[in-house]
């Protein structure tokens, strides 16, 4: 006979609530290290070269009202 009663590996309420999300974040925070803040400076456009965009991507962006038109 097959045992069809499997233990849940995830909570049945997938939406959860803010308190459970906050708790999840608090438990994960020690695993993530914040990167050191770099003082980045703008780069002169004359120093940017060698960037190529595939024609297909350029056409896609050109067709988007926010970018090309």
Image (cartoon, rainbow, N blue to C red):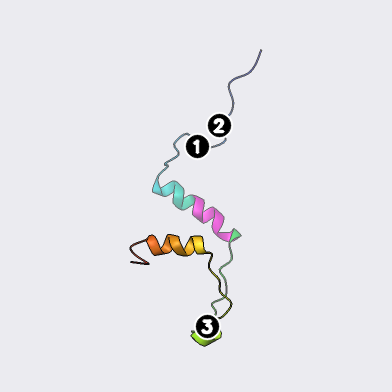
Residue 12, percent from left and from top: 47, 34
Q: In terms of secondary structure, where does tag 3 sit?
A: loop
Q: Could you tell me how many numbered marks the image carries?
A: 3
Image quarter in which the C terminus is found = bottom left
Residue at numbered disc 3 = 39
- For marks 3 and 1, give the one nearer the viewer: 3
Q: Is residue 63 above or below residue 35?
A: above
| Residues at marks 1 and 2 touching, judged by CB atoms closer than 8 Å | yes
Mark 2 or mark 3, earlier in chain: 2
Q: Residue at x 52, y 82 (%)?
A: 40
Mark 3 or mark 1, earlier in chain: 1
Magenta residue check for 26: yes
Residue at numbered disc 2 = 8
Magenta residue check for 48: no
Residue at numbered disc 1 = 11
Q: Residue at x 58, y 62 (%)?
A: 32
Q: Nearer the viewer, residue 26 or 60?
A: 60
Q: In terms of secondary structure, where does tag 2 sit?
A: loop
Residue 19, percent from left and from top: 42, 48
Q: Residue at x 59, y 20 (%)?
A: 4
Q: Nearer the viewer, residue 55 or 22?
A: 55
* Magenta highlight: main SS: helix
- Residues shaded magenta: 24-30
Q: Is residue 20 above or below residue 68?
A: above
Q: CA distance from mark 1 to mark 2?
A: 7 Å
């Amino acid at each position: 006979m097959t045992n069809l009663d499997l233990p849940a590996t995830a909570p049945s309420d997938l939406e959860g609530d803010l308190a459970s999300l906050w708790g999840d974040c608090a438990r994960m925070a020690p695993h993530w290290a914040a990167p050191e803040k770099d003082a980045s400076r703008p780069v002169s456009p004359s120093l940017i070269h060698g960037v190529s965009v595939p024609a297909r991507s350029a056409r896609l962006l050109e067709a988007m009202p926010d970018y090309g038109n």
